[in-house]
Amino acid sequence: MKILMVISQFHPIIGGTERQAKLLAQTLRGKGVKVSILTGCWRFGTAHYEEIDGIPIFRNFACWGMFGIKGVRTLSGLIYMFTLGLYLFMHRREYDIIHVHQALYPAFVSVFVGKQILGKPVLVKTASSGETSDINGLKRFPLGSFQLKYLLKEMELLVAVSKVSAKEFEQLRFPKERIVNIPNGVEVPKEDRTSYDQVIHAITTARLSREKGVDILLKAWKNVFKEEKTLKLAIIGSGPLEEEMKKMTQSLNIGESVEFVGFVSNVDTYLKNADMFILASRTEGMSNALLEAMSYGFPCIATNVGGNGELLGGEDKEIPLGEYVIARNGLLVNPDDVKGLSEAILYLVRHKEERAELGRRSRTFIKENYSIDSIAGRYISLYQFMLNKRS
């Protein structure tokens, strides 16, 4: 079985979708599936072919950001679409199934060339929902509405990473029977968390951009810090709002309790030393950061957006403004709710038994339902089903 994963951006560009694609590819290869990744060459000097941790990576030409050219992102996207289609056709004997990460313009090309012209099985996996959903992202691209209509008509199979993303496509009348729910997976640490005695170090892992709600977290942290002076918050990640967030920290007079760690390739050290995890996103798909935190057995707080409610076990709960709810695996708050987030943080800080119960429960839940090994197994079954339909 030979799988070609198509993703518009990949290493050295790293985000949640890219990390998930790499983890899934590695796990599938460990199970004997031949997986290669096809992406764009967006930066000058990036190799057109290389292997990363044993995964073959092919990069097609796109000109945005190369040779110092600026302001030609749309042109680059169009060039990438052409080179992607050309690669799919020229290398058609080298793969059995096309697996597309994100329902964006590479999905349109993959379905048009892969399914319509070559007769190959093509599955498309969603990445996000809400404000930053794949649907909205595709609509912003030139002829995006046309591409979306084509995908809704011609996609053989859509993999939704959360119930919310599945519902968004159902609302566009994409057939429910052609949607398969497979969430993102995570490598689960072998050792259980042993201590929930105190909360000193809180942590968030997020890109410093508007959709991640770090500004809301900082405002909530000001309220928390007034009452709990020993607490520390580590913010792991970088992004376009980094300087703005650092200035906000100083203007809120919480600089002594907040550390901007920046981007790190391996967050294990920080996760091992933290006591609580907070995710203040305005929009999400299936958060890799929340999956990782839960797998470590953290007591977690997250906004009830995207797949967060699914993970914490409270997606159907109504949350009054300014308050929080205690779900099965963690605490849920509304997005953009400074008071609700502040109260949720203080609750966990002050309730040891609840911290321990929620932390243990979240780790068990992830081990049983979201381990990357079991998720990869579900994909293998899906691949085999798609191939059997053509035999």
Image: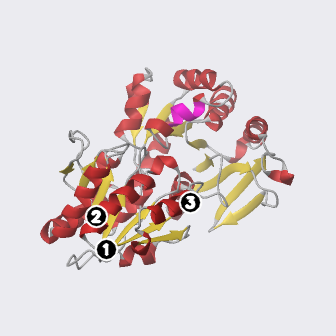
Check residue 231 in the rendering and tell me which mark sits there, or answer none.
1
Q: Quadrant of residue 139?
A: top right
Q: Amino acid at mark 1?
A: Leu
In this rendered view, identify the residue nearer to me: 148 or 218: 218
196 left or right of 163 in image: left
N-terminal label among 2 and 1 = 2
Q: Amino acid at mark 3?
A: Glu
State the quadrant of the C terminus. top right
Residue 390 visible: no
Number of labels in the image equals 3
Give the alpha-carbon distance from disc 3 to disc 2, as whole Å: 22 Å
| CB-based contact (under 8 Å), mark 2 and mark 1 | yes
In this rendered view, identify the residue nearer to me: 88 or 349: 349
Part of the protein shown in magenta: 133-138
Residue 139 visible: yes
Q: Residue at x 55, y 57 (%)?
A: 244
Can you give x and y, in whole percent of width and height, for residue 303 in the image? 33, 49
Check residue 242 in the rendering and tell me which mark sits there, or answer none.
3
Give the alpha-carbon distance from disc 1 to disc 3, as whole Å: 22 Å
